Image (cartoon, rainbow, N blue to C red):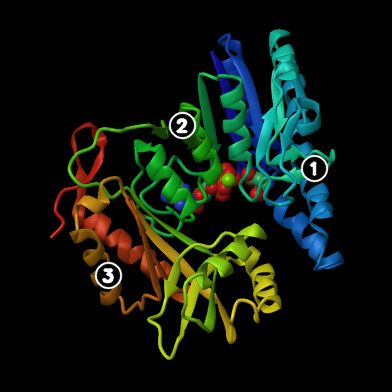
Amino acid sequence: MLIVKKFGGTSVANKERIYNVARRCIEDYKKGHSVVVVLSAMGDTTDDLLALANDINPKANKRELDMLLTTGEQVSVSLMAMAMHAMDVPAVSLNAFQVGMNCTSRYGNARFKRIDTDRINHELDSRKIVIVTGFQGITKYDDYATLGRGGSDTTAVALAAVLHADLCEIYTDVDGVYTADPRIVPNARKLPEITYDEMLELATAGAKVLHNRSVEMAKKYSVPMVVRSSLNESEGTIVKEVVKMEKMLITGVAADKNTARISVIGVEDRPGIAFKIFNKLAKNNINVDIILQSVGRDGTKDISFTVSQDDLKDALTILEENKEPLTIKNITHNEGVAKVSIVGAGMMTNPGVASKLFEALFNYGININMISTSEIRITVLVEESEIDKAVRARNLILQNKICKAKGGRISVLYLC
Ligand code: ADP
Ligand code: ASP
Ligand code: MG
């Protein structure tokens, strides 16, 4: 069997943890499996490197930032190989150059384009454990680029896909995927299984347990995936195409504080204006999330939308520079907002869910700024200060209204 095992920062934070990971990988290796290990940077290394850069130059160039950030993963893979050697097991560490992991040139948010398998297969054939740097790729200019925060998950899934691995295991500091972030909601429940679609919505909505692009890729290439703890033997959560569904499902709650609201005020109320505004942003690689348009008055209207905080500065600059052609009278923004989402397959077939959620938020006195939905997700924008309260409110709905159905699947059984 070929297994790709990915370990996050906390799982390799110090010497003891590195040896713990080495032992877990060697166990599989000694059973005769081929083992590819993907690692993140140790502990808070990436945050520390970002702080260092910010101290030197708060407007650091994105290429140089990626040059700096990719060093974190190189430290952990080489130390891991040394630990395995100390345990008399053949292992080799490789970075994105050595593997040939090619990506787009968008520094800080690159996507994989092509991954070579020759070097890895060659090392596996000579019975080595192969340890690969997560989070990084090589651009067509031979520069390093990173995949966005949490991107090592995507490295692991991408490798599992191209190597046709039998399993991709994502090891982290919690026992699996929960109905809500177990650090915010202590009584959140661990899910034995979750579908790719639900997991993708949860991850995109801010559940950072998995990088959303890793889930996208796992679905696209049908990569068998499990999320589990590196600190115990608990079984974890299987992420797969379909899970047994019983009645209406609400799978989980996620929160995302990395969001900001922008409002463009007084734009002309005529066809094509919204297109021009969002086209301008899209051309500059700015992802827009929830959009709300006011009813027109005196031939003008207001449009509000959310972007990630990382894109806020760029978005404001672009809008400011194009105020006239886009007919914008005024631009306002608010960084103190956060998104809270509830996700579950089949949610839309039950009209009671949305109103239950709004009732719970009302009971907590939480004001909703904006709402967006997909077939299996409802997201509301609230003040950031309310977010933990909001997650708890939504989780309360889950706790009160769900019970364990047959086969351990969490189902919403009573909605009203
Ligand atoms: P790693 O460093 O292993 O990649 P991350 O910090 O990126 O770990 O992701 C794991 C964290 O995700 C957990 O510690 C937990 O606080 C958070 N999290 C958010 N939502 C969820 C959820 N629904 N289920 C499990 N963990 C979640
Ligand atoms: N080290 C990177 C980060 O902290 C990548 C990862 O952990 O997945 O975002
Ligand atoms: Mg992560």
For disc 1, the neighbor class at 10 Å (few under 14, some 14 to 19, many from 20) is many
User: Is residue 89 in view?
Assistant: no
Residue 75 located left or right of residue 277: right
Tell me where residue 11 appears, x and y as whole percent: 61, 39
Query: Between marks 2 and 3, how big is the CA–CA gap?
Result: 33 Å
Q: Against 321, is 143 above or below?
A: above
Do callouts 2 and 1 mark residues in contact (Cβ within 8 Å)? Answer: no
User: Is residue 362 in view?
Assistant: yes
The quarter holding residue 37 reads top right
Question: Which SS class for mark 1?
Answer: strand
Residue at image position (42%, 49%) is 201
Q: Against 292, is 189 above or below?
A: above
Mark 3: which amino acid? Phe
Using the image as rendered, state which of residue 244 and residue 295 is in the foreground. 295
For disc 2, the neighbor class at 10 Å (few under 14, some 14 to 19, many from 20) is many
Tell me where residue 293 appears, x and y as whole percent: 42, 75
For disc 3, the neighbor class at 10 Å (few under 14, some 14 to 19, many from 20) is some
Query: Between marks 2 and 1, how big is the CA–CA gap?
Result: 29 Å
Query: Which disc is residue 226 wearing?
Result: 2
Disc on the earlier residue, 2 or 1 = 1
Q: Residue furthest bottom?
A: 298
Q: Please identify, in this view, whether the residue under mark 2 or under mark 1 is nearer the observer.
A: 1
Q: Which residue is mark 1?
A: 144
Residue at image position (70%, 26%) is 131
Residue 51 located left or right of residue 355: right
Query: Which disc is residue 59 wearing?
Result: none
Query: Which disc is residue 358 wearing?
Result: 3
Using the image as rendered, state which of residue 310 and residue 413 is in the foreground. 310
Mark 2: which amino acid? Val
Mark 1: which amino acid? Tyr
Using the image as rendered, state which of residue 105 and residue 190 is in the foreground. 105
Disc on the earlier residue, 2 or 3 = 2
